[in-house]
Amino acid sequence: MRNLKKQDKEIYQATMGELKRQQEGMELIASENYVSEAVLEALGSVFTNKYSEGYPGRRYYGGQKYTDAVESLAISRAKKLFGAEHVNVQPLSGAPANMIAYMATLSPGDKVLGMDLSHGGHLTHGHPVTLAAQIYKFERYKTKADGLVDYEELEKMAKEFQPKLILAGFSAYTRQLDYAKFASIAKKVGAITMIDVAHIAGLIAGKVIPSPVPYFDIVTTTTHKTLRGPRGGMIMCKRKYASAIDKAAFPGFQGGPHENNIAAKAVAFGEALKPDFKKYARQILKNAKVLEKELRKYNFKIMFGGTDNHMLLVDVFSSKGVTGKEAEKALDEVGITLNKNVIPDDPRGPMDPSGIRVGVPAVTTRGMKEKEMKKIAGWINQTLENSHDKKTLQKIKKEVMIFCKSFPIYSSIK
Ligand SMILES: *Cc1c(COP(=O)(O)O)cnc(C)c1O
C-alpha cells in the first residue's frame, strides 16, 4: 500500500491497525471471514471507475468490453457452483438483495411469513425498524423446544395468514432446514418460496449441506460470509422470476453495479469451484461440532439442540451467570471477537441478551482444526468464569495472541 502510505497517513495507519487486529485476534463472528489476496486485488481494481448500468450485452453506457466479461464470468461461475437457473450478481449486499427480491415478487401491502428474529431470523425478514416492514405485512414462525422449526405451526399459520411469500433462512439458527417441507406448505397455500442463505452459502457451495436451490423460487445470499468472497449480495432464481429480479435490481432498487466487487465475486466463485473449498467447508462442520462438544463439557447451554452448520448459539446467562453483553466484552478483552445474541423468546431483550453467537468460518480459513477448537473452548470458558479478574484476562490475551500468530494471514501486505 505504498501510495496510501505516502499520501494519507491517517487512513494508512487505520488500515494497518485493522490488519494487525485481524492477524492477532481470534475471529469468531459467525458472519465474518478472510478473503484471499486475489479477491482483495480484484476489489481494489480499476473496475471501480466504471459505470455499467444494465446487464452484460445491454448497458446504458459504452466501454463495456471488460465489465461484460467479468460480470458474465461471475454469473456463469455462480450458476455452476449452485446449479441455479438464473443469477443476478449486482445486489450491493445482503439487505439490498432481500429488498430486490421482495420488490420482484410483492406489491405494497402483500403478506410475508418469515422466521422470528429471536429464533434465528434476520432483521431484513420483517423487523419493525426496516423499510420492508413498512411496505409489506410480516408474520413470524418460530422453533420448537427441541430446536427444530415448528413446521406444523408454520403450516397452520400459512393457511390462516395466506402469505404471498414464505421466507426461510436465518442468521443465528444452527440446524438444517427441511426445504421440501417449506416447498410443500407453500404449494398448499399458493405462496412463492424464498430462502436467504447469507450464512450458509459456502456450506452449500462446498456441498457439505443440502442445497435449497432446487426447492425455492428465489434464493438470496451474501457473498462475504461462509462463501468467503467480497462484501456483497447475489440472487438466484427460477427462470420464471429472472426478468422480474433483474428489473427490480436495476432500475428498480439500485443504480450502477459495483463491477470491482463483481470481479471479486467472480474470483471467489472460481476459488469455491476448486476441490480445496470442499475440504474447507467440511472442516467448518467438523470444527463447529468439536466446539459444541467441548463447550458442553464446560456446561454451556447450547441452543436449538446443537449445530448442523458453522455456528453455535450459546445461552451464557443461564450457564455462567454472565449476560451476552458482558460475555462479548470480556472475550473482546482477551482478543476473542464474537457477538452477543438473543436466544429464542429471550427474557432479557436485545440490548443485553442472554446469549452469544460463535462461528468458525474465519478460524477455519486460518487453518485451525479440531485440536485448536478445544483450546478455543477452554479460553471461552476461562474468560467467562473469570470475567472480573483482570490478571487472568491479561494472561489469556497473551496466549490467544501468540496462538493466532502461529496461523498467519496476509503476511505479504505492508
Ligand atoms: C448477513 C445477513 C443479511 C444482510 O447482509 P448485509 O450484507 O449485511 O446487508 C441478510 N440476511 C441474512 C440471513 C444475513 O445473515
Image (spheres, rainbow, N blue to C red):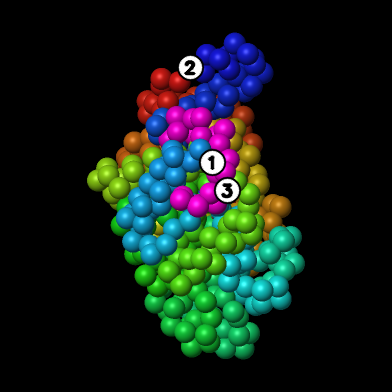
Which residue, given by chain and number where applicable, does mark 1 sit on?
Answer: 62
Q: Is residue 179 magenta?
A: no
Q: Quadrant of residue 95?
A: bottom right
Of 340 and 128, which appears nearest the observer? Answer: 128
- At which x and y percent is residue 158? 57, 84
Q: Which residues are magenta?
A: 39-62
Q: Is mark 2 within 8 Å of ligand 1?
A: no
Q: Is mark 1 within 8 Å of ligand 1?
A: no
Q: Is residue 42 magenta?
A: yes
- At which x and y percent is residue 240? 46, 72
Q: Quadrant of residue 296?
A: bottom left
Say if 154 sits above or below 375 in the image: below
Q: Amino acid at mark 2?
A: Lys
Residue 228 shows in the view? no
Which residue, given by chain and number where applicable, does mark 3 sit on?
Answer: 60
Residue 34 shows in the view? yes
Q: Residues within 10 Å of mark 1 (few under 14, many from 20)?
A: few
Q: Between marks 2 and 1, how big is the CA–CA gap?
A: 37 Å
Q: Quadrant of residue 268?
A: top left
| Residue pictured at 38% horizontal, 62% vertical | 84
Which residue, given by chain and number where applicable, does mark 2 sit on?
Answer: 414
